[in-house]
Image (tube, rainbow, N blue to C red):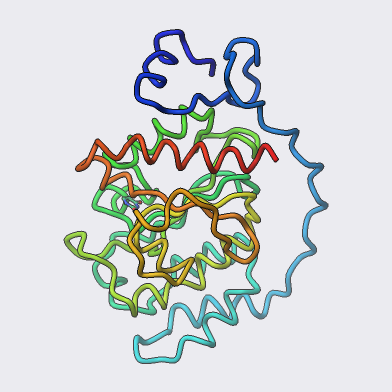
Amino acid sequence: MAWTDRQRAMLRAMGLSVWTPPGAPIEAVADASPALPEAPVPSPPAPERPIVPIRAAVAAAAAAEPTEALEPLAGEVATLDWSALRAAVSACRACALCESRTQTVFGVGNPSAHWMIVGEAPGEQEDLRGEPFVGPAGQLLDAMLKALGLTRSEAPPQQQVFIANTLKCRPPRNRNPEPSELARCEPFLRRQLALVQPKVILAMGRFAVQSLLRSDDAIGRLRGRVHRYEGVPLVVTYHPAYLLRQPADKAKAWEDLCLAASLLER
Ligand code: URA
């Protein structure tokens, strides 16, 4: 997508950087950064994984009691391929959220996406539809992604992001996730990150940050610089639901997205 003159004028007026999405003619945006690099040659498909750990992980996820130690489930999940991971998530009964959910919300997007976006937990609409970020916060997220030439819809891995949450089940009445729920769900997010192997991670909001960076610092202190998760560059930004309440901070979120995009140019 090329910026129109009006959009560019508006972004400049807000003091925001202008981004050239992949494929856009550079000369159309005089002061923009270069387009994203070519996609790397895809690696050959991973060999079939043994079936036993997959069955064991689904069974462990289905049978888990909130009082059980976390390690066995985490160990099994770390070996799963995509379809087994999806099955393990939907069978999971490791915390009480399984009692109130309509369905689990696994994640959406390109399994080899260059961008992985991590949010907090499904809300009401996500719980009903089984897809992350489909409510008002999701519409804002989609608009921000579109401004960078990114999408959750079918596209090559440079453009199609993968979106996941720290929790795969909706907390009742959208309350904050409990530390024990975050801990029990973490193996699923870890495995998703290991399978996607993104080139950049965008952590939105404090629960994503707590899970991925083990930090309780405020977003305002963590944003604006590059962190690392297992060696992968990670940029912290505000959660879109917060931005809906505090639109003045949208400009900072845009800067964070531009910072993340700039990492893929290098
Ligand atoms: N907020 C999140 O963090 N995730 C969703 O899926 C929806 C709202």
- In this image, 254 relative to 241: left or right? right
Percent of width and height locating residue 155:
60, 33
Q: Is 174 placed above or below 125 here?
A: below
Asked whether 190 or 65 is in front, the reply is 190
Residue plotted at (48% across, 28% down): 17
The answer to which quarter of the image holds residue 190 is bottom right
On the image, which quarter does residue 210 sit in?
bottom left
| Spot occupied by residue 178 in the image (x, y as percentages of width and height) | 28, 74
The residue positioned 59% from the left and 34% from the top of the image is: 159
Q: Residue at x 41, y 15 (%)?
A: 7
User: Is residue 16 or residue 231 the one in the foreground?
Assistant: 16
Q: Is residue 99 above or below residue 114?
A: below
Q: Nearer the viewer, residue 9 or 163?
A: 9
Number of numbered callouts drawn:
0
Q: Position of residue 124 (x, y in %)?
A: 24, 52
Residue 182 percent across, percent down from the top left: 38, 72
Left or right of 184, for residue 192 = right
Q: Is residue 120 left or right of residue 74?
A: left
Quadrant (top left, top right, bottom left, bottom right) of the C terminus? top right
The quadrant of the image that shows the N terminus is: top right
Q: State whether residue 25 is above or below residue 197.
A: above
Residue at the extreme left of the image, as rendered: 173
